[in-house]
Amino acid sequence: MADCVFCSVIEGRLPGSFVYRGDEAVAFLDLFPVHPGHLLIVPRLHVEDLVSCPPGVAGQLFELSAKLAPAVVRATEAAGFNVWTANGKAAGQEVFHLHLHLLPRFEDDTFGLRFPKSYPQEAGRAELDAMAETIRSEM
Ligand SMILES: [Zn+2]
């Protein structure tokens, strides 16, 4: 897509600092890193989100995150890392071309997801079973 920033980076119309270029996916550094080494793993195919991504390509993104994470951790001397993806505006997605964030983490780095005020509250088994049934009925 011509107006997609990630397609533009992949196609060389915008600059990118690439760590990996494969047939199905690429990895380049986030222009607005949470921490140095914050990597984006992006399919070459323009798909909006995980749901619209062919399963084989989605699998490759996760395999690539496992392949690249040790190098990111060594290069940044991180204490750990997160792999996550935002799907939909409510989930924090800002660029609507599927991407995984590979984010190096450090002790007390102050970054994190915020839990709701009600958390943690253990769910009842009946409630969990009912939700599991509802999800299964949607599959
Ligand atoms: Zn795109």
Image (tube, rainbow, N blue to C red):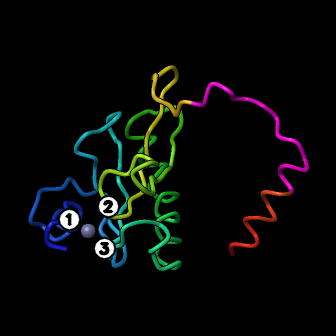
Label of residue 4 in the image: 1
Q: Label 2 belongs to which residue? A: 96
Q: Residue 13, percent across and down?
A: 9, 65
Furthest-top residue in this view: 108
Question: Element under label 1?
Answer: loop
Distance CA(mark 1)–CA(mark 2)? 8 Å
How far from the left and from the top, in percent, is residue 46? 30, 73
Identify the amino acid type marked 3. Answer: His
Does 60 sit above or below residue 30?
below
Label of residue 46 in the image: 3
Q: Give the spatial CA distance, label 3 vs label 2.
A: 9 Å
Q: State the CA–CA distance, disc 1 to disc 3.
A: 8 Å
Q: Decide: marks 1, 2 in contact (CB < 8 A)? A: yes
Of badges 3 and 2, nearer the viewer stands: 2
For residue 108, side relative to residue 34 (left or right)? right
Magenta stretch?
A: 115-129
Residue 74 against residue 89 in the figure, above or below: above
Q: Residue at x 21, y 68 (%)?
A: 7
Q: Residue drawn at (44%, 55%), measured in percent from left and top?
A: 68
Q: Is mark 2 within 8 Å of ligand 1?
A: yes
Confirm or deny contact between disc 1 and disc 3 (CB under 8 A).
yes
